[in-house]
Amino acid sequence: NTMQELPSSPRNSKSLSMPFLGLAAVLLLFFASHTSSCTEQESSSLINFLDGLMPDGNGGLNDSWVNGTDCCKWEGIICSSDGTVTDVLLATRGLKGGISPSLVNLTGLLHLNLSQNSLEGSLPTELVFSRSIIGLDISFNRLEGHLQEMQSSNPSLPLQVLNISSNFFMGQFPKTAWEVMKNLVALNASNNSFTGQIPSFLCINAPSFAMLDLSYNQFSGNISLGLGSCSMPRVLKAGHNNLTGALPDGLFNATSLDHLSLANNAKLSNLTVLNLGSTGLSGKIPDSVGQLKRLEELYLDNNNMSGELPSALGNCSNLRYITIRNNSFIGDLSTVNFTMLDLRIADFSMNLFTGPIPESIYSCSNLVALRLAYNNFHGHFSPRIGNLRSLSFFSITNNSFKNITNALQMLKSCKNLTSLLIGINFKGETIPQDETIDGFENLQVLTIDDCSLVGKIPLWISKLAKLKMIDLSVNQLSGPIPSWIDELGFLFYLDISSNNLTGNIAVSLTKLPMLLSEENVAKLDPKFLELPVFWTPSRQYRMVSAFPRMLFLDNNNFTGTIPPEISQLKLLDGLNLSSNSLTGEIPQEICNLTNLQMLDLSNNQLTGAVPSALNDLHFLSTFDVSNNRLEGPVPTGGQFHTFSNSSYSGNPKLCGPMLNLDCTSAATNQTSTSRRHNLRFALIIGITSGGLVALALLACFLIARLAYYDHTENVVPLRSRQR
Ligand SMILES: *[C@@H]1O[C@H](CO)[C@@H](O)[C@H](O)[C@H]1NC(C)=O
Ligand SMILES: *[C@@H]1O[C@H](CO)[C@@H](O)[C@H](O)[C@H]1NC(C)=O
Ligand SMILES: *[C@@H]1O[C@H](CO)[C@@H](O)[C@H](O)[C@H]1NC(C)=O
Ligand SMILES: *[C@@H]1O[C@H](CO)[C@@H](O)[C@H](O)[C@H]1NC(C)=O
Ligand SMILES: *[C@@H]1O[C@H](CO)[C@@H](O)[C@H](O)[C@H]1NC(C)=O
Ligand SMILES: *[C@@H]1O[C@H](CO)[C@@H](O)[C@H](O)[C@H]1NC(C)=O
Ligand SMILES: *[C@@H]1O[C@H](CO)[C@@H](O)[C@H](O)[C@H]1NC(C)=O
Ligand SMILES: *[C@@H]1O[C@H](CO)[C@@H](O)[C@H](O)[C@H]1NC(C)=O
Ligand SMILES: *[C@@H]1O[C@H](CO)[C@@H](O)[C@H](O)[C@H]1NC(C)=O
Ligand SMILES: *[C@@H]1O[C@H](CO)[C@@H](O)[C@H](O)[C@H]1NC(C)=O
Ligand SMILES: *[C@@H]1O[C@H](CO)[C@@H](O)[C@H](O)[C@H]1NC(C)=O
Ligand SMILES: *[C@@H]1O[C@H](CO)[C@@H](O)[C@H](O)[C@H]1NC(C)=O
């Protein structure tokens, strides 16, 4: 309410809703305004800037930016005590239009923040090379074009923070910038389209340089940085570029002969974040990585790197996050001493590692996520894995581990496990049934797919009270769907496809609480995955609750009918019952599953009609009833236009325009002849009289015919004309 008392604020209600910083700025402006006012050149510069904006994109600034009044009182403007404009703070105002170079005439300007607007055009070079600005943030706009080189030389610019990320800039980054920005502390040029050789960016001659983000651009070429007299930023992100070549061994060489100074050592060892993921780097990780004693985060994922990990990596004892996912590293991880007490997240997946899980990793008592998936690790699990008390995400999918009983016995002592992905291991073993598999009380995601496991779906799974997703697909599990399945109160994703399961589609399956009502779903805790999970090659998930709600029961030996109670699973996104031995009709009630995006009932022995109300399923994008014994017309309208013939093939008695099979000829021989007669009669009248009456008669006939098929469910099917 203090705002109400401000005489200079013309739009109180709007000001009240401003975030705290905005409020602080206005308060500052209020106090500043009592001291002295800005110069005419300054107001003129600002008015010119305002004029450069579009009428519908000036953020309402023209209410307070009135020529002739003191610009120190204008919204978003802060002046020093002597009335010099020092700050122009106009982030997130919906500004549209160009940035006028007139702002360069604010000769005392220190901070310019125009981020998160919709500004277009180029960024005036004068602003980048301003002799006063120390903080320039124009990130998240639609600015474009090349950044120009500086024309006249200037020994040193005051700029400390430059944020031009998330625009459409292209071309080379201006070379002169690196030379004259001697006070630079942070530079963020990420998420643009800069091209050309990656700047010899470590050669910024700025002693306080701490943060450089060049990621998400198209910089290319080698990383070939001699350290020289350059500063090393503490945070270096250049991921998602088009780099080539290897990391040169001298990259981190603090002790290179010419520069064996303590200062250089210190600069080097201060690097805390190195992100060179998705850049196309090849070659080994150089031994000199061990010089980075303060390194906390190392991203080298999605590159073409190879060779063994250097044992010197173990010297980076402050590592908290390491990912080298998706490269071609080889060898035994045990060459590195992973006794790193701060290590929280480690992703070694999709490489060619062999050997056992290194013992040293068991001493990382703060490890939260460990992914070893898609390698060739083997061996047994050590009881020491229980030391990993914080371990929440553990994935060993697709390796050569043996003895699933042992693995589960060891892993159950990791009390904090929420995601356990152990599929494509333990080939042909028997899934343990015994009661001693307990614990796992926090488990939410469990995948044991593609192991060719034999046995029944074990009872211990019923005790995983927090389970949301389970994948037991591609095994040889036998027996029925357990009747306790609906006791899993949070389960919304069940994949038991491609097993040897038998019996009916259990009614208990139609009572899974998470699929029944939104009220139940509201009880789900929003669990963030510690590492993103790639469920399909193209889709990655960061939250468990973002997964679709699915039942995959396909490729088993289920018999009996589809229970009509299936309609209770209102929240279901996908249902796959294909390739079983199901009989009977498709229950009408299935049309109540209005969330369905995928429905696959193919390769069964279903009979009767395809419920026409299926066209109420507006989200359906995959539909397959092929290879059954269905008959009658296929649904039309809505998204049913988009399904191809193959959705219906192998059902000789189905008909409809989709199948080029006229359902009219499908009636009995008598009705079809009498209809043909009527049609001929109408046509004859139409042709001979040529009158409107006849045409109307014809229309009535056709409409009646359509109506007949819309309202009659059990149309006598006709034989296929295609034969
Ligand atoms: C602002 O007003 C002054 C006179 O008060 C005038 O000289 C100047 O041209 C005006 N500036 C703009 C940008 O209209
Ligand atoms: C800065 O101000 C001077 C004098 O007022 C004017 O001539 C010049 O055009 C201005 N510069 C820009 C970029 O607007
Ligand atoms: C970046 O690499 C991709 C794939 O190698 C290539 O298609 C693209 O043209 C490259 N872009 C530039 C700017 O070099
Ligand atoms: C890096 O340092 C190692 C010794 O620590 C030395 O053998 C190597 O030549 C150095 N590389 C460069 C490029 O300076
Ligand atoms: C490195 O970090 C230390 C301690 O944080 C600091 O005193 C030193 O100035 C930093 N060196 C550089 C070159 O940033
Ligand atoms: C690994 O490092 C830790 C701590 O630095 C040390 O105690 C341990 O002996 C090392 N292990 C091996 C096998 O070198
Ligand atoms: C286990 O998880 C809970 C909840 O996420 C957390 O509060 C607790 O600190 C974790 N325990 C350990 C030992 O990390
Ligand atoms: C698998 O592990 C269990 C429990 O540790 C053990 O009793 C069993 O002998 C092991 N089986 C094989 C084949 O090694
Ligand atoms: C599962 O079914 C396949 C083929 O139907 C068969 O070859 C296999 O022996 C069966 N396995 C078990 C354990 O019943
Ligand atoms: C299904 O079960 C029948 C007998 O119950 C068996 O003959 C057939 O091989 C099984 N099919 C599959 C795919 O397991
Ligand atoms: C489910 O479908 C049946 C038959 O189609 C219908 O009678 C019933 O009202 C539907 N139930 C709900 C809750 O929509
Ligand atoms: C329908 O008529 C055709 C010939 O007109 C005949 O071959 C066929 O058997 C008849 N079908 C039925 C079901 O009567």
Image (cartoon, grey):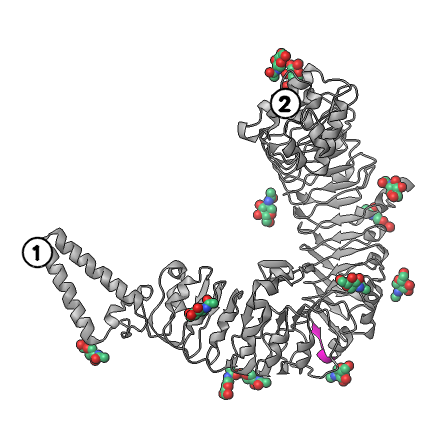
Residue placed farthest to the right in the image?
A: 262
Q: Which mark is residue 688?
A: 1
Placement of 375 over or under 287, stated as above or below:
below
- Kindly identify the residue that appears in the image at 20 percent across and 71 percent down: 672
Q: Which mark is residue 285?
A: none
Quarter of the image where one finds residue 205: top right
- Kindly identify the residue that appears in the image at 33 percent across and 64 percent down: 658
Q: Is residue 423 left or right of residue 413?
A: left
Q: Point out residue 414 in the picture as x, y percentages from the top left corner.
A: 78, 70
Q: Is residue 277 left or right of residue 53?
A: right
Q: Is residue 517 left or right of residue 410?
A: left
- Kindly identify the residue that appears in the image at 72 percent across and 50 percent down: 246
Q: Nearer the viewer, residue 428 or 102?
A: 102
Q: Amino acid at mark 2?
A: Trp
On whether ligand 12 comes within 8 Å of the CB at mark 1, the answer is no
Placement of 544 over or under 653, stated as above or below:
above
* Magenta region, residue range: 400-405
Q: Tell me which image quadrant ligand 7 sits in.
A: bottom right
Q: Point out residue 254 in the picture as x, y percentages from the top left corner.
A: 86, 45
What secondary structure is marked by label 2? loop
| Mark closer to the observer (1, 2) | 2
- Say if residue 586 shows up in the picture: yes
What secondary structure is marked by label 1? helix
Q: Point out residue 210 in the picture as x, y percentages from the top left corner.
A: 79, 40
Earlier in the chain: of badge 1 and badge 2, it is 2
On the image, numbered disc 2 is attached to which residue?
65
Q: Quadrant of the N terminus?
A: top right
Placement of 507 over or under 655, stated as above or below:
below
Q: Point out residue 32 in the picture as x, y percentages from the top left corner.
A: 76, 23
Q: Amino acid at mark 1?
A: Thr
Q: Nearer the viewer, residue 217 or 135?
A: 135
Quarter of the image where one finds residue 662: bottom left
